[in-house]
Image (spheres, rainbow, N blue to C red):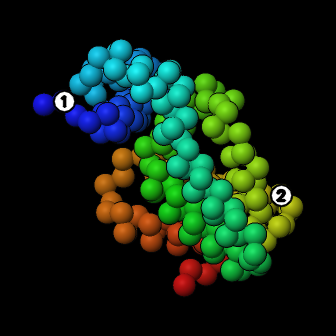
């Protein structure tokens, strides 16, 4: 029995994300994606004009989540902003674990991708919130450590339940920033 087009589209996206996370964006072909999705390459191309279009659709929800976090942080200051930045970033990194893994595997290939255009500026504001706007070298390095460690940990296959992982990431990030976890 044939799947409805919207179900096939979702299955193609799931298959592509699985392959991108295991083989890298560069390592997965449209043919590979179609095979895993159980459809022809022609059917895949009916739904997506290119592999880049698939990637853009996969990364859009993460980008929207990052933009929403950025908007939430704009009204906060100090300790409240730092904690919201850490908690929000951990939640995003955990929610989009496979997407983060794809990004880390293929940073050179994906760095200039249009779907990632606003990410550097948003991450800079997120890190500024974590360190309350400090431009001191220690604060900047610490913010980079938190962002990198959270992303890498979420991209890894850590054998820890999600609730425990989230709690440890938040507590560890806040400790790294010199804050007392609640």
Which residue corresponds to mark 2?
Answer: 137
Q: Is residue 105 visible?
A: no
* Residue 159 placement: quadrant: bottom left
- List the single residue furthest toward the left: 1
Residue 34 in view of the camera: yes
Disc sitting over residue 160 in the figure: none
Q: Residues within 10 Å of mark 1 (few under 14, many from 20)?
A: few
Which quadrant does the C terminus fall into? Answer: bottom right
Report which quarter residue 46 is drawn in: top left
Comparing 132 with 59, the one in front is 59
Foreground residue among 106 and 14: 14
Q: Position of residue 4 (x, y in %)?
A: 26, 36
Image location of residue 158, percent across then percent down: 36, 52
Task: Name the residue: 53% across, 28% down.
Answer: 53
Secondary structure under tag 2 reads helix
> Who's the residue at 65% across and 56% down the image?
67
Answer left or right for 125 relative to 47.
Answer: right
Q: How many marks?
A: 2
Q: Is residue 160 above or below residue 8?
A: below
Tell me the number on the disc at residue 2. Answer: 1
In the image shown, does 2 or 83 lie closer to the viewer?
2
> Is residue 137 toward the left or the right of residue 52 in the image?
right
Q: Is residue 103 left or right of residue 83?
A: left
Quarter holding the N terminus is top left
Q: Is residue 154 above or below residue 8?
A: below
Q: CA distance from mark 2 to mark 1?
A: 58 Å
Disc 1 on helix, strand or loop? loop
Residue sticking out furthest to the right:
135
Relative placement, left or right, of 135 versus 167 is right
Q: Residue at x 83, y 67 (%)?
A: 133
């Amino acid at each position: 029995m044939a799947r409805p087009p919207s179900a096939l589209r979702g299955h193609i996206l799931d298959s592509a994300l699985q392959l991108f996370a295991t083989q890298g964006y560069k390592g997965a072909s449209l043919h590979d994606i179609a095979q895993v999705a159980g459809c022809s390459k022609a059917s895949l191309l009916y739904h997506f004009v290119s592999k880049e279009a698939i990637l853009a659709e996969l990364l859009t929800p993460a980008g929207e989540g990052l933009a929403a976090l950025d908007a939430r942080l704009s009204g906060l200051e100090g300790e409240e902003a730092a904690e919201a930045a850490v908690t929000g970033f951990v939640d995003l990194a955990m929610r989009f674990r496979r997407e983060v893994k794809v990004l880390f595997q293929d940073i050179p290939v994906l760095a200039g991708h249009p779907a990632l255009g606003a990410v550097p500026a948003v991450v800079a504001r997120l890190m500024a919130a974590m360190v309350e706007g400090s431009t001191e070298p220690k604060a900047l390095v610490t913010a980079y450590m938190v962002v990198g460690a959270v992303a890498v940990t979420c991209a890894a296959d850590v054998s820890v339940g999600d609730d425990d992982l989230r709690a440890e990431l938040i507590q560890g990030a806040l400790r790294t920033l010199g804050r007392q976890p609640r």
